[in-house]
Image (tube, rainbow, N blue to C red):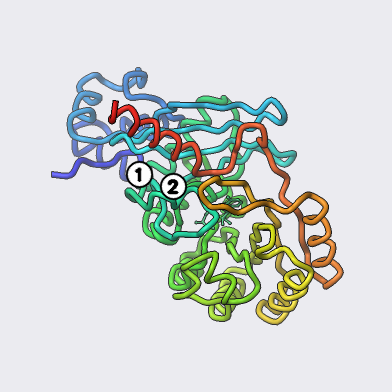
Amino acid sequence: MEKTDILSLTLDECRSLAVEMGEKKFRGEQLYSWMQKGTPLSEMNNLPKAFRERIEEECDYRLPEIVKKQVSQKDGTVKYLMRMIDGECVESVFMRYEHGNTVCVSCQAGCRMGCRFCASTLRGRARDLTAGEIFGQIAVIGRDTGERVGGIVMMGIGEPLDNYDNTVKFLRLVSAEAGLNIGLRHISVSTCGLIPGIKRLSKEGLPVTLSISLHASNDERRSSLMPVNNKYPIEPLLAACREYFEKTGRRVSFEYTLISGENDSERDAKDLSGLLKKGIKGPCHINLIMLNRVDETGFEAPDRKGAERFCRLLEENGMNATIRRRLGSDIDASCGQLRLNNMENQSQKAVK
Ligand code: SAH
């Protein structure tokens, strides 16, 4: 029988679990409240021993374990390598912004989307994370830093809309009033553009910010960088974004990673502006990201001046664009590489 994944439970479900195990309802509330703080079972000292033992035996408490931690000396960004119950590792990042602390979470161990410039996808997808495992990254970071987390970006390893049910469950968990109560408006879900998932998400009543990884202004170039574009090309993707805005009232933002010689020319900037003006017909924002070099991919980032020129061109063409500040540049804070290095170390150990 599959064990109950208790970190994925809502407050009500925790109450029911307690009752099923012969305890009073409030024991479930205590359990829930400890889990929100990322507390290990052994430290839940107001729970009766018998209850803890039953949980230990009959449930999985999938709290991630911190196996590596890198702290940026420049801006206090903390990057974590977290181990899941079965040994799979993912990355999470804690970032300090003026408007509050934000955590970047992973939603799958690996990724199967195959974007050519991305480290997370190089070894494919091992498995989806459960809602609790996504949530657990935030709980553990809250405990480790002792600070409040006010915002979340689903921009770590994995494709949220390829793990749709757990993503939606996670969004409900993390925004629950009785729990961390993180405002849905302070949560961004980033996707490579799985159209059916975008349409479903627009009907969930979850007003999160949708971020589309666009990275190119025409189908030929986008398909060469992102195989997913063969299935879900740009035009219907932008139509789904319009629908998202109409249904949720939330403006969609676009991510555009600048890759030298691939998508960073003047022509590209003009085409991108034209494309979004025509395709979105409403307000939108473009986040320019400097490529983070991944050795295996052979791509390079443009220089800072080139990126600024690109940004200016977008603005001159009526777009709202910014170059994303690179937090944690001294600790290699973009995702995928720690997991990859860790996997390589593990397999070297296995060979030895
Ligand atoms: N699967 C989601 C989340 C991915 S990570 C998505 O595709 O949106 C968040 C962002 O980082 C995406 O826009 C992704 O395309 C981008 N990204 C991936 N690898 C990168 C790299 N090496 N340098 C810069 N950005 C990268």
Quadrant of residue 52 in the image?
top left
Q: Secondary structure at mark 2?
A: helix
Q: What residue is at 74 percent from the left and 78 percent from the top?
A: 274
Mark 1 lies on residue: 8
Is 254 on the left-hand or right-hand side of 207?
A: right
**Amino acid type at mark 2:** Leu
Q: Kindly give the residue lying farthest to the right in the view shown.
A: 316
**Amino acid type at mark 1:** Ser
Q: Position of residue 146 (x, y in %)?
A: 57, 25
Pick whichever, 181 or 291, lies toward us: 291
Label 1 and label 2: CA atoms lie apart by 8 Å
Disc 1 + disc 2, Cβ < 8 Å: yes
Mark 2 lies on residue: 173
Q: For the residue carrying disc 1, how many other residues have a C-alpha within 10 Å: few (<14), some (14-19), or many (20+)?
A: many
Q: Position of residue 266 (x, y in %)?
A: 79, 69
Pick whichever, 178 or 296, lies toward us: 296
